[in-house]
Amino acid sequence: MNRRSVAILAIALAAVTATSGATRAPVREILNVSYDVSRETFADINPAFVADWKKKTGQDIKVNQSHAGSSAQARAVLEGLQADVVTFNQVTDIQVLRDKGKLVAADWRTKLPNRASPYYSLPAFLVRAGNPKGIKTWDDLVKPGVGIVIPNPKTSGNGRYSYLAAYAYALDKTKDPVKAKEFARKFLANVVVFDTGGRAATTSFVEKGQGDVLITFEAEALGTAKEVGPKVQVVTPPVSLLAEFPVAVVDKVVDDRGSRAVSEAYLKYLYTPPAQTILARHFYRVSDRKVSAGFRQQFKPTKILTVEAVLGGWDKVAKDHLASGGILDQVFVRK
């Protein structure tokens, strides 16, 4: 190779090196793919994060939202929806992104505090004014003539929690899986409407007047009662099931888009006192002790069961209840 060729090659290599080392333009938008009833919550959180990010970095950012049933959203992400972050309402809906798509890190549950769940809730009941059916506990829901409205457990994490809470309540009470399964069957047999997501179920109950009781997250029940007024009332059962709201960065997307820094900051922001306060104002229970203390009066004392303690953990739930032919399929009564 002569000197002229060497010089040309050196210039070409320098150009490639300069290009590969160039700083990528900062990302201007990220997409948070979330569950159905979180619209109002993130409509308040996102501007607060945008302001915080601007203050810290000087950069303008926009957080876009996508909402539907949690399990349906997980399928959409697997099918190509470009979520930078997911904020779901069930562990299995994030784990499936790992198991079927390798879209999130294997250790996603340890990357953030509280097993990557910045806030939590539990299934509660919304009833008509005066509670004409006298609904106070899970036992009241399996009585003849009680019409239940829930999201479809096949498409909605909200609905899945309702089913699991009923089963867990019966199992904790009877210590008998056969009796718990029969309780779940009676529970689902009383459902008059299976909606695709939590907000549709709220609409069916409140606006369409269907059913005697809506089972939904306590946060949705309390928020709806605040909005609707005295024609409904919230009943928090004395026993319910912990509903975690796990979050994760979608690694494949953020690495392709160069949005990892802002996406990770967004999820970490959910644990800060300002965000925890917004969450509590939307009737979620939060982990920040100081923030939680200021909102304690809005929640009823409840014995909170956990999937791990009563149902053996999410892996067992996925295998025993949610897999094709599992307990949910066996007791599911289609309407």
Image (cartoon, rainbow, N blue to C red):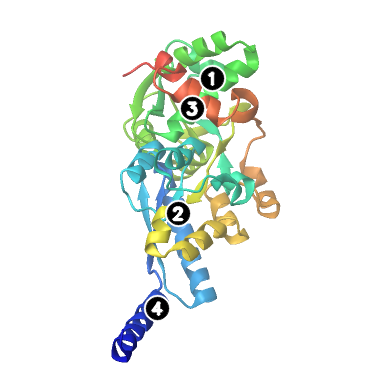
- Residue matched to label 3: 318
Please tell me whether mark 1 sits on a helix, a strand or a loop.
helix
Q: Residues within 10 Å of mark 2 (few under 14, many from 20)?
A: many
The residue to which callout 2 is attached is 251
Q: Quadrant of the N terminus?
A: bottom left
Farthest bottom residue? 4
Residue kind at label 1, given as amino acid type: Tyr
In the rendered structure, the answer to whether residue 274 lies left or right of residue 159 reads right
Q: Around disc 4, counting alpha carbons within 10 Å, would you say few (fewer than 14), some (14 to 19), or many (20 or more)?
A: few
Q: Separation of disc 3 and disc 2 at Cα?
A: 23 Å
Specify which label sits upstream in the sequence, 4 or 3. Answer: 4
- Picture residue at 49% right of the left edge, 37% below the top: 221
Label ID, residue 267: none
Identify which amino acid the numbered label 4 is placed on.
Thr
Residue in front for this viewpoint, 216 or 263? 263
Q: Quadrant of the C terminus?
A: top left
Q: Position of residue 20 (x, y in %)?
A: 39, 74
Instruction: Name the residue carrying label 1.
Output: 167
* Element marked by disc 4: helix
Q: Is residue 296 above or below residue 139?
A: below
